[in-house]
Amino acid sequence: MRLRHRDHRGCTRCRERPSAVRPRNPAVIVYLYMGQYLSKNRTAKAMAELFNTPVSEGTVGSATARAANDLGAFGIAVADRIAAADLAHFDETGFRAAGKLHWLHSASTAMFTWITCHRRRGKIGMDAARVLPRFTGTAVHDAWAPYDNYRQITHALCNAHVQRELVAVTEYHNDNPTASGIESWCWAQQVIDSLLVLKDLAEDSIGPVAPETLAHHRQAIVHAAHIGVTDSPQGKVGNKHRALARRLIRRIEDYLRFATDPIVPWDNNPAEREIRMPKLRQKVSGGMRTLTGAEHFAALRSYIATTGKHGITTIDALTRLTTRNPWIPEMT
């Protein structure tokens, strides 16, 4: 008859099944797989080599699924907190899952991150994330058209994004000089100059930029954009430049929101940082084999990013999660 024992430290059988006596091991598995972007195979090998712990790819998958499935209450709480915020950042990026292109949608504040995966990039995918349909604050985002479907929000467009578009216009202009060969003035450079001046003024001031200064640069931007509409070259490139100029005229208040509201930043870099890590995961280990796996990755990435913003280390947060005690923000 097999005897039961209380002291597992000297037991060979228990060393071979460390998850029974080492609750931190599932956290390490999830940390390596979802936190450090190793593949399932490399995670299993790392566990075996680092901790003398035989682990199969199936064990890696089941530990990850169990952890992600325990994040239901966390996801509801975080989505609610972002939906109720005065200002939030939004972005989306492509992500391979089940051999097809899917989309990661991110919504974030200074203290919370919520990432979801969906088959669609536009409003259907955004609605599924459960934030934008309820959000009534200021949304910082790029000029992706589906954001305009949410009429209840105040829009603040990313100036870093439009600056990259404007730089492309100036580069094209410089690479295609006039017939006389004389370097000519480019409308896009005037827009860049005014935006950067306002950026510096907004960062240096406590409140909004002085109305007369803002009006001067606003007029300079709109005037230059009108020239861009009329003077851009014919063809595909010129059409793209004209579309940019028209957007600047139509959305000038949204682009200059940072100069009138002190809580609005100049760019949407926080949102871009949120999706940079998932892009790194795809670069290191490829996409996910299934949509469910991608959804688990998004949920765990949200958990790791949010707990990090609250000063909790990744391994500590995952230890709490894999012992069925996930960190959940307190109700306000």
Image: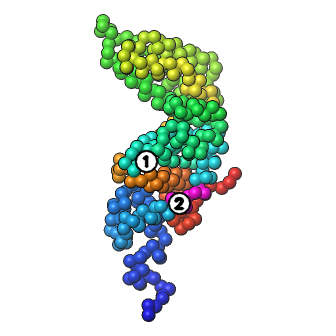
Mark 2 and mark 1 in contact? Answer it, CB < 8 Å.
no
| Rendered location of residue 279, percent (x, y) | 41, 45
200 over 190 or under it: above or below:
below
Residue beneath label 2, please?
A: 69
Helix, strand or loop at mark 2: helix
State whether the magenta stretch is mostly helix, strand or loop: helix
| Rendered location of residue 45, percent (x, y) | 33, 65
Q: Name the residue at the bottom extreme.
A: 1
310 over 153 or under it: above or below:
below
Residue at the (65%, 37%) spot, across then down: 136
Q: Amino acid at mark 2?
A: Asn
| C-alpha gap between disc 2 and disc 1 | 19 Å
| Rendered location of residue 257, percent (x, y) | 59, 28
Q: Check residue 216 for magenta coloring.
A: no
- The stretch in magenta equals 68-74
Q: Residues within 10 Å of mark 2 (few under 14, many from 20)?
A: few
Give the numbered dot on residue 278: 1
Helix, strand or loop at mark 1: helix
Closer to viewer: mark 2 or mark 1:
2
